[in-house]
Amino acid sequence: MFSPLTANIYLPCVPLLQQDYQTTLQLINTTITAYVLVQSIAPAFFSQLAETHGRRPVYLVTFTIFVGASVGLALQTDYVSLLVLRMLQSAGSSVSTSIGYAVIADMAAPSERGRLLGSVMITVNLGPVIAPVIGGPMCNNLGWRWIFWFLTITGSFFLVAMGLFLPETGRKIVGNGSVEARGVNRPLLPFLITKADTYAKPKVAQYASTWKRINAYIPNPFNCVLLVFQRDSACVLLVSGLFYSSYYIMQASLPPLFQDAYGYNETQVGLCYLALSIGVIFGSQIQAKLMDWNYRKNAKETGWEIDRQGGDDLSQFPIERARARLAWLFMTLQCACILGYGWSVHFRVHPSVPLIFMFLEGYCGWIQTWNTLMVEIHRDSPSTASAAGSLVRGLFAAGGVAIMAPLYDVLGIGPFFSILVGVVWCIGQTMIWVIRHKCMDWRLEREGNKRS
C-alpha cells in the first residue's frame, strides 16, 4: 500500500509546492517524474536480494530507507533537497508492491492466484483512495510538510509491525515451508517468546550449505533488464506499460486541469481522486474473478487437470491465452474512458462527467493481470520478473508525465488525450494478439534454450 500511498498523497499539493518554492509547474512535475523513475528502477536493485536473501530482510531495509527519507522531506527547505529526498523515499517504498507479487507466487497455486491477488489488490488500491483524501485536506489546512510527517509515523508503525510479525515466504529460504527460517528471516516475536535452546533446527539438512551459498551471492540488478529483450516478456511488459502509463497520466493531470477548469482547491482535488480509486478497487475484484474464470475455462478447453494442492506445472499450459482472454475488450473500454475524460475537461462540461469517466477507467484497468502473467512466465524468479514490470511501467509513466503538460499546452487537452488513446490502443491491441497466439511458443523456446 505504501508505494501508491506515497505517490498519490503528494499530488494534491503540487500547486502549493509550486507557490512555496516560487518555481514552475514543470519543475514540480519533475519531482513526480523523478519519483516514478526511481520507483521503476529501485526494484531492479532489490529484487535479486529478495530472491536470494528472502523477502523479509528486503522489506525491513527498504522501509527503514522510507522512514528516514520521510523525516528529511518534512524538514527540508529547498527544491534540490525535495527532489533528492523524494527519489530516496521512492526507493524505499517502491519495492513493497513488486515483492508483494513474488509473495503471492510463493503462497498461491496458479488456479487461485486471481482470488488471492484480488484480496491483496484491495489493500494496494487503498493507497490511491485514502492518499488524496488525506493529502488534500492536510495540505490545505496544516501545510504540505504534514504529509511527510504522516508518512513518517505510519511508515514507522509498519516497520515495527513487520519486524515483529512478518514471516519469510521466499522459497530459496524456507522451501515449501519445510525449512525453518533463521536470523533476520525469522519474525522477532516468536524469537522473543522462544528460548534459544528450544529453537527448531532446519528440517532440510542442506540448509546450512545453501545459506552459505546465498550469502556469497552478489546480486545483479540488471537481471530484470535482460527480461525486456526476451520476446514473450517484452510483449507482456509493453502492454503492462501502456495500461499503466495512460492510467498514471490521467492521475497526474487531474490537479492542474481541475484547478484551471473548475477552480478547485487542494481539498476538492484530493476528493476527486476517490472516483478513480474506487473504480480501481471494484475493478480489481472483477479482474480477480475473471482471471480465475479464464484460467479454469482455458484448462477445461485444453483438457488440463487443475492441481489445487501441489500447484499446476505451467511449463506446458497456455497461461498466456488464459490471462489475455478479454484483454482486448478492457483495453478498448479503458481507452474510450480516457478519451471521454480528456474531451469533457477540454470543453469544461460539468465536473461529474470527467469524474464518471475516471471511475470507469479505474474499473476497466487490466494492470494486475499482466503483472501476474509476468510472474507466471518466470516462475523461478518472481521478484526479478515483478521488478522488470515495475521498471517498464515506471519508465512509461515517467515519460508520459514529462511530456504531458508541454503537449496539452500546445495541442489542447482533448487532442492530447486523443493522440494518447490512439497510440495506446493500436500498439496494445497488436501486442494482445501476439501474446495470445505467439508468446507461448516463444516461452517454450526460451525455456528449452535455458535447459540446454
Image (cartoon, helix red, strand yellow):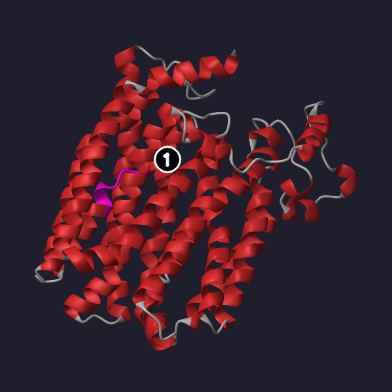
Q: Nearer the viewer, residue 186 or 392?
A: 392
Query: In this image, 216 relative to 448: left or right?
Result: right
Task: Give the vertical position of 437 relative to 31 (above or below).
Answer: above
Q: Position of residue 17 (x, y in %)?
A: 41, 81
Start-end of magenta stretch: 362-367
Q: Position of residue 232 (x, y in %)?
A: 41, 27
> Which element is circle 1 on?
helix
Query: In this image, 292 relative to 348: left or right?
Result: right
Prevailing secondary structure of the magenta residues: helix
Query: In this image, 448 relative to 113: left or right?
Result: right
Instruction: Residue 277: tell me if it is visible.
Output: no
Q: Position of residue 396 (x, y in %)?
A: 38, 50
Q: Nearer the viewer, residue 111 or 32?
A: 32
Task: Give the vertical position of 449 relative to 224 (above or below).
Answer: above
Residue sitting at x 57%, y 46%: 44
Residue sitting at x 78%, y 29%: 203
- The three-letter code of the residue at mark 1 reads Asn
